[in-house]
Amino acid sequence: MYFDLHCHSVSSDDSRATVEQYLKWIQVLRKRGYTVDGIVLTEHRKFDFDKDYSQLADDYGVIVLKGSELDTRFGHFLVYNVTQSLASDIDFGDVRMDARELMQASQHHGALAIPAHPGRFGIGLVDFMDAGETFTDVKIVEQLNGGGRPGENERADELCEAYGYLGTGASDAHLASHVCTCMTKFGMDISNEGELVLALLSGDFSPVKLEETSTA
């Protein structure tokens, strides 16, 4: 299965894309011969417990999952399988939270937090590790980010090679036409957030670019 694990709808403060616009664009991609099974909406500094996209997902035949992208003092982290108990333990709006505490709390509540765009200049995990910070709970990072500037994904590649991290792929889309430019290929079926975490913990995945999913 092919999933875009990082995209933002209008629920994020810097995106202009609605969820339906993403799903309509995925139909265009499919007609062009590309394979897309699902997306994960990772809204900034929040989790939309009140939003239900199941009808849209059924209408367009695309799995729509929800997550979060949280700011920490050690860069941005993507959180999957967010629960009410996790949201009660962690202040999602706290941009100075310790990423290590976020990872531990996520694990405790059956969620998973991984570094987003670790090679991003100035705010990526690479810079903090170069400064001497250590992150023993990191096993997976977002290796391929569709919104990266030249050199940033390469830094993520080097990080994965140096530390043996597994890597995901995602678009980091904020516009409809940017969705699924990069994705993660999974070797197991995923239909909900809990299964997504299990698939990530299994290690049976790899980052891919959209063109690698072509069936043409």
Image (tube, grey):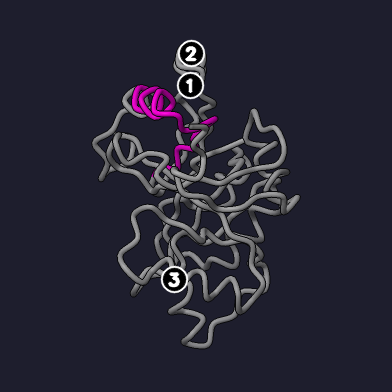
Between 82 and 3, the residue placed more toward the observer is: 3
Label 2 SS: helix
Disc 1/disc 3 C-alpha distance (Å): 36 Å
Q: Which residue is pictured at 52% across the width and 88% down the height?
A: 132
Q: Which residue is pictured at 46% across the width and 79% down the height?
A: 128
**Image position of 169 (left or right of 192):** left
Q: In the rendered structure, which segment of residues is drawn in magenta?
A: 24-43
Do labels 1 and 3 touch, CB within 8 Å?
no
Say which amino acid is labelled 3. Answer: Glu
Say which amino acid is labelled 2. Answer: Gln
Whichever of callouts 3 and 2 sits on the residue coming sooner in the sequence is 2
Q: Nearer the viewer, mark 3 or mark 2?
A: 3
Number of dots carrying numbers: 3
Q: Nearer the viewer, mark 1 or mark 2?
A: 2
Do labels 1 and 2 touch, CB within 8 Å?
yes
Residue designated by label 2: 55
Is 41 within the magenta?
Answer: yes
Q: Position of residue 137 (x, y in %)?
A: 67, 67
Q: Quadrant of the N terminus?
A: top right
In the image as oriented, which residue stretches furthest toward the front?
Answer: 216
Residue designated by label 3: 154
Q: Is residue 65 above or below residue 90?
A: above
Q: Nearer the viewer, mark 1 or mark 3?
A: 3
Label 1 SS: loop
Q: Position of residue 18 (x, y in %)?
A: 31, 28
Disc 3/disc 2 C-alpha distance (Å): 38 Å
Query: Dot 1 surroundings within 10 Å: few (below 14), some, or many (20 or more)?
Result: few
Whichever of callouts 1 and 3 sits on the residue coming sooner in the sequence is 1
Residue designated by label 1: 52
Between 90 and 5, the residue placed more toward the observer is: 5
